[in-house]
Amino acid sequence: MVEAAFYGDDFTGSTDALLQFARCGLLGVLLVDLPPIDELHALATRYDVIGVAGIARSLPPDEQEAELRPVLTALRYLNPRVVQYKICSTADSSPELGSIGRALEVGRSVFGPATVPILAAQPDLGRYTVFSHHFAAESGTVHRLDRQPPMAYHPATPMRESDLRRHLAGQTDLRIAGLHLTDYADISGNLARSTADAVVLDALTDNDLERLGQAIVASGNGMPSFAIGSGGLSRAVALSLSSTARAADRAALRSARAAPRSPDDAGSGPAPTSADRAQALVVSGSQSPRTRQQLGHALASGWLILTVPDPTAGQQAVAALLNGTPGVVVHTGRHTEQPAPHLVGTFGEVLAGVVRKVVHNTAVRRVAIAGGDTSGRIVRALGVATLEVLPADHQLSPGTVLCRATSSDALLDELHLLLKPGQLGAPDLFETFRTLCAPSATVPDPGGGETQALDR
């Protein structure tokens, strides 16, 4: 039965949450849309974790609530131990866009008036919270969040305050307090005694996450606990929930998914090929300096770089790949300001059209999508139904997740998708992603089992 559920406020973050549960041996599936209730309940009998990938981070508050409320209501009736509203580890939000405060209000109206834990820290990504102040690493230096260059100058939600209590107080009238490392002798007791509507939690290490996860999971007293947080919260909950009780069932299900579904399906995934002949497509709406650095590395490695809204970008990408170009990046160019929400949607539709054209007309079966806000629009526009984590996390950069898609479109079904937050990933990420197509590549199983071949 399902033990945890989450709604992700963007698609890249949703896959990160799924990965954190997988790292602890919990079987999960990520839904692109909320299915009929009978299908959702059927999934709850097969998976430990059910996630719904959303786009709330790019929505104004009223639209955000309209998207979020039915999902949280449906997940509550699955009766998991914890339901998470998954946010970015840099707490990207503002009163006007992707409001965490509004999510807090909606969550309390669905789950009841208990104090809501808020855990933004994710130590494995260099995200830390101390005395409610949030810190983020960049290029080997840990900055206070309002001084970290990508967040201080973020085009959509620039960070002006590192104290998450004050940051979130600008988004809601609810009372927000902090629970600090100096109070961690009795985390459960201090949470239970809190009279605040929400409590920002400190964390510096994986050990902190484990202790917090135990307290959060236990706080529901038989009812689902609602919590807000990054992939650090996902890991905290997963560390508490993981056990050997269903290890055999999980191993059997992993094995079943690793095998082709029928002889005819044996070639439906990415075609085996040598690393030097492998090809990949990247589509990007990200404006981050890190993504620009990755584009520059791809260009230096012989990739073709195209921009939209050039209407010929799709045809140019197909022609280049058919002529042997190792990879193609199609991106939205640089913007001095955050595009309006309707333009984000338009970019998503255009880039999805490029993906569809390339997949339908070439042998490329590996696609990377960069940018949290546009990734959701692209995946939804492609008609992807679900995503499952592939066992490739150790081959790529922290915070990036390689998934296998399911779709009613036969050419998109089994497509391998890499979803990359704008600020994350090594400079050579796209070239590394391309060369992973080699048939000899094997990767560790996140559930702790044997290694599996990446291509079938």
Image (cartoon, rainbow, N blue to C red):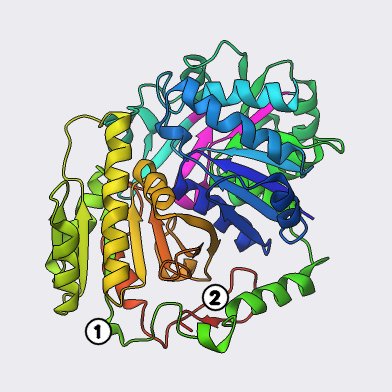
Quarter containing the N terminus:
bottom right
Residue 70 percent across, percent down from the top left: 63, 33
Q: Amino acid at mark 1?
A: Arg
Q: Is the residue 132 above or below the residue 9 in the image?
A: above
Name the mark on residue 277: 1
Task: Name the mark nearer the viewer: 1 or 2.
Answer: 1
The residue stretch that appears in magenta: 115-133
Assess whether residue 86 is covered by the magenta stretch.
no
Q: Is the residue 317 above or below the residue 377 in the image?
A: below
Q: Secondary structure at mark 2?
A: loop
Residue 115 percent across, percent down from the top left: 71, 23
Residue 178 visible from this viewpoint:
no
* First reached walking from the N terminus: tag 1 or tag 2: 1
Provide the residue designation for mark 2: 444
Q: Amino acid at mark 2?
A: Pro
Crowd rating for badge 1 (residues with CA inside 10 Å; few <14, some 14–19, many 20+) = few
Q: Quadrant of residue 137?
A: top left
Q: Is the residue 72 above or below the residue 432 in the image?
A: above
Residue 174 percent across, percent down from the top left: 61, 13
